């Protein structure tokens, strides 16, 4: 056997710790005669005795004491090397999936559940979510900076979506001061809101969706204040600071805490519906994108072909 054999080194340390070959054999779950023979063979390999066997309880010799100190240093270094190898191996096999999503979908629990379920199935995959506008998602998919995307319908025509899987239907919700006098639980029609002011996400967030919706709101006499950024929380904070309402999605409305003085109302007939979908990745996308797409189909249902309006 080699003098740096880690197994025999640990066996020798256990014998020295318990001061007994028989007790060490029991602790190591090996036969006592085998351990005694192994110890003597190792001492012959070293060229000196590790233990004084002249008494009932064996003890380390002077050489054995020096050896044990050196063995502990060697084994600690070996353990650190083993841990480093495992860490390097884990990192080398780790894959990151870059996921694009609109900020208006940041409160969709079903989106997060799908991503978490995928990571449980593929524990070597790290998911990184990027909140972007629809044009930014389109560009990032084309350049390979994104692997997969969640997108609201209607999809940008330039995306040429081959297929999609719906995650959740969303609709516009009204975040309004209770002092405006609308009874909680009632549905609010657009004509009732004529002359009211509402904060809204910038139309550039998703031109195909926001453009037609905002046009209908303005045609109803609603005054819109489009925000300079894409943060739903900034939208809420601006509305409260100005004492006006906000147009948000039902998912983010559900995500909002109960705020004193404000409430959430539905619009009659839910005229502004939109499906949040997983978009089929491009053929040139990374393998992990295809795995996520197949997983989404299994979890959410069959893919819908085409580019629905």
Image (cartoon, grey):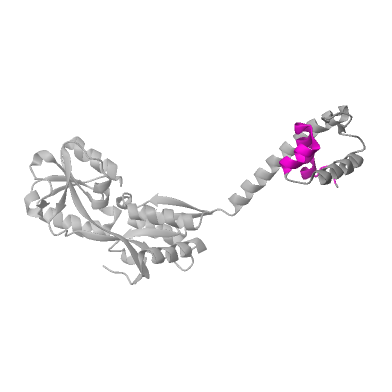
- Residue toward you, 259 or 19: 19
- Residue toward you, 129 or 117: 117
Rendering coords of residue 137 (x, y %): 38, 57
Rendering coords of residue 258 (x, y %): 22, 40
Residue 175 is left or right of residue 182, and the answer is: right
Question: Residue furthest toward the front?
Answer: 56
Residue 187 is left or right of residue 251, and the answer is: left
In this picture, which residue range is highlighted in magenta? 2-28
Q: Quadrant of residue 209?
A: bottom left
Task: State the residue at coordinates (51%, 63%).
Answer: 287
Magenta stretch encompasses residue 11: yes
Residue 102 visible, this orientation: no
State whether residue 104 is above or below residue 8: below
Task: State the residue at coordinates (47%, 55%).
Answer: 120
Residue 299 visible, this orientation: yes
- Residue toward you, 85 or 35: 35
State whether residue 153 is above or below residue 72: below
Rendering coords of residue 204 (x, y %): 28, 53
Rendering coords of residue 176 (x, y %): 15, 43
Q: Quadrant of residue 71?
A: top right
Q: How many marks?
A: 0
Task: State the residue at coordinates (87%, 27%).
Answer: 62
Quadrant placement of the C terminus: bottom left
Residue 1 is left or right of residue 302, and the answer is: right
Task: State the residue at coordinates (21%, 38%).
Answer: 259
Question: Residue furthest toward the bottom?
Answer: 305
Magenta stretch encompasses residue 58: no
Magenta segment's dominant SS is helix
Q: Quadrant of residue 52?
A: top right
Residue 252 is left or right of residue 35, and the answer is: left
Question: Residue furthest toward the top?
Answer: 62
């Amino acid at each position: 056997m080699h003098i740096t054999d880690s197994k025999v080194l640990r066996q020798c340390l256990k014998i020295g710790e318990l001061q007994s070959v028989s007790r060490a054999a029991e602790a190591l779950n090996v036969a006592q005669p085998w351990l005694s023979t192994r110890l003597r063979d190792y001492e012959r390999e070293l060229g000196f005795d590790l233990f004084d066997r002249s008494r009932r309880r064996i003890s380390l010799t002077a050489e054995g004491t020096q050896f044990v100190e050196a063995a502990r240093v060697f084994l600690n270094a070996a353990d650190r090397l083993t841990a480093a190898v495992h860490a390097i191996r884990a990192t080398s096999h780790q894959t990151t999936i870059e996921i694009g999503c609109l900020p208006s979908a940041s409160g969709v629990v079903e989106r997060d559940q799908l991503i978490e379920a995928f990571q449980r199935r593929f524990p070597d995959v790290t998911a990184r979510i990027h909140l972007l506008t629809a044009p930014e998602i389109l560009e990032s998919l084309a350049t390979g900076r994104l692997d997969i995307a969640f997108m609201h319908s209607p999809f940008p025509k330039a995306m040429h979506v081959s297929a999609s899987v719906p995650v959740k239907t969303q609709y516009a919700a009204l975040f309004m001061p209770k002092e405006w006098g609308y009874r909680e639980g009632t549905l609010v029609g657009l004509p009732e809101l004529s002359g009211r002011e509402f904060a809204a996400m910038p139309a550039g967030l998703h031109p195909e969706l926001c453009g037609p919706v905002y046009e209908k709101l303005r045609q109803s006499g609603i005054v819109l204040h489009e925000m300079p950024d894409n943060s739903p929380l900034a939208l809420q904070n601006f509305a409260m600071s100005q004492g006006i309402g906000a147009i948000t999605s039902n998912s983010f409305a559900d995500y909002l805490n109960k705020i004193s003085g404000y409430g959430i109302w539905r619009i009659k007939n839910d005229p502004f519906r939109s499906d949040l979908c997983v978009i089929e990745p491009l053929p040139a996308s990374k393998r992990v994108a295809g795995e996520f797409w197949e997983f989404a189909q299994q979890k959410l249902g069959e893919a819908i072909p085409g580019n629905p309006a």
